[in-house]
Amino acid sequence: MAYESQLAETINIRGHKGDTVDAYFARPLGAGPFPGVVVIHHMPGWDGPHKEIARRFAHHGYATILPNLQFREGKATPEENSASVRAAGGMPDDRTMGDVQASIDFLRTLPYHNGKVGVIGYCSGGRQAYLAGCTLRGIDAVVANYGGGVAAKPEELTERQPVAPIELTKNMQCPILGLFGIEDTRPSPDDAKKTEEALKKFGKTYEFHTYENAGHAFFAVDRPQYRVHAAVDGWKRIFAWFGKYLS
C-alpha cells in the first residue's frame, strides 16, 4: 500500500490591510509539487466541517488554506461570529477579497507548490469565490457552490456588498464550475440561469450543474440539507475540475 500522510494546523497570515488572520492549513507531506486551494467558508463560519473539507483536499494532494474570514468579530464561537456579521449586514467584500488574496499569495510562496491555485466556496463563500475569480490575481480555477447573491438585484446591494458579482463577469479570469440545487432559493434556478447566460455572453470557460432533490447546503454533512447523491457527484466534479486546471 502507498504511504499516506498529511499535516494540518492553525497558522497566521497577513490579510487585508496587514491584519493578522488565523487560518487552517492542511497539506500532504512530501516534496510535492502540490497545487494549492483556498477554501472560502460559508456564512455560519470557520467551523469543523470546513476544516474537514481542507483535510479532504490535502488527502487528494492539494496544499489547502481555509482563512477565518470572521475572526475580526472576536467572539468565542463560529456561531457567535456569524451572528455578529449578519447583524452588521454581511461580510464586507473589500475585506474578504483582501484576506482571500493573502491566502492565494501565501500558497504561492510555498517551496512545494506547483504554481497553480484554485478557489472554492460554499454558500456566501460561493458568491465570494465568483467575485474572487473576477477581481483577484493568481487564480487558475474557481468552484462556486450554491453562491447566493451572485445575481443580486439592485435593492439587495449594501454598503458592504455594493456590486453584484455577475456585473463583473467580463473580468472572470479563469474557468469556473458552478454546482446548484434545484430546490434552492438563493441562488434560485433562475439566478443560476442568469449567471450562466453572463458567462456565455463573455465567452468564459464554465460548467454548471444543478441537482434534483437538493437545495442549499447539500454538501453540509452536519445539516439536514445534506443530500448524499448531490454531494458524492459534486465532489467527483470538483476533483475533475481542479485536476484538469491545477495539475
Image: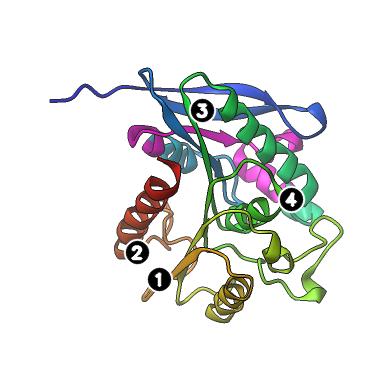
Horizontal placement of 82 versus 141: left or right?
right
Q: Position of residue 35 (x, y in %)?
A: 45, 34
SS at mark 2 in the image = helix
Q: Position of residue 131 (x, y in %)?
A: 67, 56
For disc 3, the marked residue is 25
Please state which amino acid type lies under the numbered disc 1. Ala
Q: How many marks?
A: 4
| Label 2 neighbour load within 10 Å: few <14, some 14-19, many 20+ | many
Q: Are marks 2 and 1 in contact (CB under 8 Å)?
A: yes
Report the disc number at residue 118.
Answer: none
The first of marks 1 and 4 along the sequence is: 4
SS at mark 4 in the image = loop
For disc 1, the marked residue is 214
Please state which amino acid type lies under the numbered disc 4. Met
Q: Are marks 4 and 3 in contact (CB under 8 Å)?
A: no
Q: Could you tell me if residue 101 is visible in this image?
A: yes
Query: What segment is highlighted magenta in the picture?
Result: 56-84
Q: Confirm whether the magenta stretch covers residue 215.
A: no
For disc 2, the marked residue is 230
SS at mark 1 in the image = loop
Which of label 3 and label 1 is nearer to you?
Answer: 3
Q: Is residue 31 above or below residue 61?
A: above
